Image (tube, grey):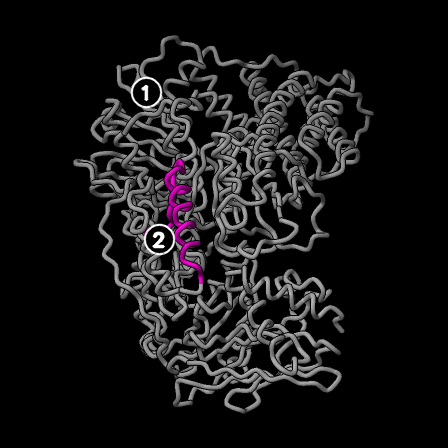
Amino acid sequence: MKILYLVHQFYPDHYTGTEKFLLELAKGAQRIGHRVKVVSYSFRQHSSFSHEEAGVLVREFLYGSVPVTFVRLPYEPADQQYNLGQGEMLDFARRMLAKEKPDIIHAAHMMGVHDFIYAAREAGIPYMLTLTDFFLLCPKVTLMTSRNSLCAGPEQGTACNQLCSEIPNAEIRRRLEITSEFLRQAHRVIAPSKFLGEMFRKEYGDLNLREIGYGISYSRIRRNLRRYKPGDKLTFFYGGSFIRHKGVHILAQAFKWVKGDVELKIYGSGQYEHVLTQAAENDPRIKLCGVFSADQIGEVLGQVDVAIVPSIWYENTPIILLEALASNVPAVVTDLGGMTEVVKNGVSGRTFPIGDVLQLRDILQSLIQDPQVLNGYKDNLKGQFILSVEQVALAYEREYQAAFPSKRRNVVF
Amino acid sequence: MLPMINDIKQKILRMAEFWQTEGAVSVAGRIYRRLRSNPPSPFLYSLDYPTPDKLHELELEIYGWAVSLSARVERIEAFIDDKLIGDIKYGLERPDVLDALPELGSSQVGFGGTFLLDEKRDSEECQILVRVRDTAGNRAEIRRRIKVAHMHRHKISVPTFDFSSAWSNDCSTLERSSVSVVIPTLNPGDELPTLLSSLKSQEGCENVEIIVVDSGSRDDTVELSRAYGAKVIEIAPKDFSHSAARNLGADAATGDYLLFMTQDALPGSRRFLYEMIQAARTSGAVAVSPAESPREDVDLFYCVNSHNHIRFLKLDGGDRVTGAPPSSDYETVRRHCQLNNVACLIERGVFTQYRFRSDYAEDLDLGLRLTADGHKLVLLSSTRVIHSHNRPAYYHLRRGFVETVSMAKTFTDFPILPTTDLPALSQGMLSSYQNLSRALNSLESELQFPCSTIQFLAAIEKRWNGPTPATNTIETFDVDDRYREFLTRLAADFSAPEKDVADDKAITATVNDMVWRIKNHLNSVYEIVDQALFTEFKQAVFKSHAMAAGVILASYFLSSPANDDATARLELELRQGV
């Protein structure tokens, strides 16, 4: 089978959760014996593309074992980030599908590459969607309103009119009609968490929806076997982008008021970096550790005691959180979105209300004063299994195969 | 200096009229206001953020863009409540501005930075002032009042949800579905806790009991298994055999079903047990084995063999319910009876009557006896067990040997390769190894990676069939030292100078057959071959060579049993440790 993957951005330029998920999935499909290709939009400079075809700049390369095609329009339309109507890449998409002849198309994110879905529908090629964020619900992607609150969904555009009035409502309503069509015509829609799937179901009604969580690479995981007794020094951990909705500033503020011989290791990069630099200058207990490679995850999580994910949006299930839990590292997370599906308060870690600096501070302080409570969380984590990348690849393979039922003769369970 | 102010002004007017997006308003609308001011400002600029309509964080982002119409922007300062808080970085990329105003000639007109507000402030409002200066001494100021969140509690209202719909992949619990999983262990490493954790979180079964039969692990396997709630049976290393260890585990089991697994396997999904039980119940079978799917770190050699094995068992077309084989030839019998102890589920009551009894291929032996008595088996393709090895060539030498001996004992028609004498075979193995080395060397030198797979396969075809110059040295490759040392030793120990005949026909044919499969795999999965994949290919070729050598040596010993110390030592070495 040949699978063409679509994504809004990809390695080596971007390496957040969606790209990580897709790269592992593509490699997994190769192991199972499928031929794959990733098509991604890229904002690289024009000169880094090798040629232009049907009005689209093209660059082809290999990332690891996965062939990738970067595409870019010579001039981005102003509404590039959210428009889902037929666009200027459609002709190129038609040509590429005619040349590549994929059996199935799988979109991990459609921003900038949605014309391939139009082309797939014209060509009668089945396609699947994985809902990696709220892009198909919300033009702002995060479901955060202009009034700094979280939104319960567009409600056919009525909520957008009230909460995000800067975007013309007619455009939002048109966009919702298109996304509804995209979702309904998909061979399968996959949600990595129940919460995310339910948000879509709430807006679009009954969809052909399945839950397949994200997987982690166990070959890189090392079990953190540390046990705790009173007085043990703790090291807290944050790993992720330094962007507003990840809430790292909430953590920095909370940690400022935490007392005791304790350390906060912050890994990542992004626009909030100098806020954190400033915090670290004022508090030697805060260590800015830069970024780490995928291969270093075992070493990094082996040296910390609690992972913290203080996001202030409907976070899905961040892969770094899954890696921490699989490494037997308890977590403290915002009680929101998909995270509460994997971190149960008082069982495998703690949860706190969104943006609540004081409560986060209190939780951290209580862990410092009574670190033995972590032993219980770690014991409970033994019974909680995070999917592996191989299991996720198999789960998706099953969905791909289901698009061609006549080709297989499986026992019906 | 911008010469075409009027042109820009016209354009801005059009943009402000027609463009409806936030970005366009930011770029166009504000410039429009600036151009309408009297006297006109010496700058075009826009403070995009913070906006007055939002509640902002204490970590305040300030960004926008600015252009001097008569000189260069020199400095941009930020003030909060009239207190200078720092300079804002200028020269950031703003392709949207250049897109709207190509006359600017540069997209590096953005400014931006993040500043920390004083957290002790009482008011929820503050005034931002951004001051732009240019090299001609002009300056412009943008003031804006903004609202800031409370210092401790970021006011983010969250709607409440009541989600209650069922998911299509939720499954109910099967009745009488308790499973005892028996896992023989010996120094398993990090893979065991992953397996135990995965088994404990299986869905759809009444109960999962884990029984670990450890034969002398020197690591923390025993303690770790107990920490995961497993029953642990400890046996001495000398008491271990594949059958005995599993029978011991089965004796301690209480489940409706037994599932035999290896320590380096992993269930393919959360419903692994549920699906195997359902497959057995739906089909009336007593035992079920799922096909293997490789681990993430699988090497090319194992991957190819794994796919090939699935095709051999005819599982590439879907699941199979099998029974007594319709004919007694080796291939048909294996295709019908090949249970696999990487994962093999069987009703406990049935197992008690049969048990394992062989020291090698005990799973196949069980399948043979079950089908002979009229029981049905299920070989699953839709449910997989994740399992693969990444072992060196020397391991595959012994694997090829042991497997061939075992199969030949089980099946009278198992194909045994015709062999000549040991000196000729030894020389043949060495010379074919050297030929492979030379072929791969010249392939590497004539190809530039990355190259297309089609080009790569054509080059292999040419090189494999072309002449190879003679040499007595073994080329150094990424093949393991132990296998190279074995070949050298074998050729030295069994040299026959008086004959000087190298028999490489069998090994060359066997390796070529394996390389053909590797080529097919490359052709179906990869469109590009890079240096890393070529390295994998080389290793796979040498592992193929090692396995073929094992098969040939087994064929030799099956027809000419060891009759002196040297051959007896060789046979012992090849039998050990698989």
Question: Is residue B357 visible in the rendered structure shown here?
Answer: yes
State left or right for residue B255 relative to residue A191: left
Q: Distance between the residues labelled 1 and 2?
A: 39 Å
The amino acid type of the residue labelled 1 equals: Val
Position above or below: B505 against B56: above
Residue B173: x and y, percent?
20, 40
Marks 1/2 same chain? no
Chain of the residue where label 2 is placed in the rendered structure: A
How many other residues sit within 10 Å of disc 1, few (<14), some (14-19) or many (≥20)? Answer: some
Q: What element carries label 2?
A: helix
Image quarter for residue A367? bottom left
The amino acid type of the residue labelled 2 equals: Leu
Chain of the residue where label 1 is placed in the rendered structure: B
State left or right for residue A180 relative to residue B355: right
Residue A184: x and y, percent?
37, 40
The magenta-colored residue range is A167-196
Instruction: Name the residue at 51% across, 33% down.
Output: B576
Magenta segment's dominant SS is: helix
Q: Using the image as rendered, state which of residue B493 and residue B292 is in the foreground.
A: B292
Q: Using the image as rendered, state which of residue A29 and residue B572 is in the foreground.
A: A29
Residue B461 in magenta stretch? no
The residue beneath circle 1 is B321
Question: Is residue A306 visible in the rendered structure shown here?
Answer: no
Q: Using the image as rendered, state which of residue A176 and residue B546 is in the foreground.
A: A176
The number of callouts visible is: 2
The residue beneath circle 2 is A196
Position above or below: A184 against B379: below
Residue B221: x and y, percent?
38, 51
Instruction: Name the residue at 44% across, 59% down.
Output: A168
The quadrant of the picture occupied by the N terminus of chain B is bottom right
Instruction: Name the residue at 58% across, 49% down.
Output: A41
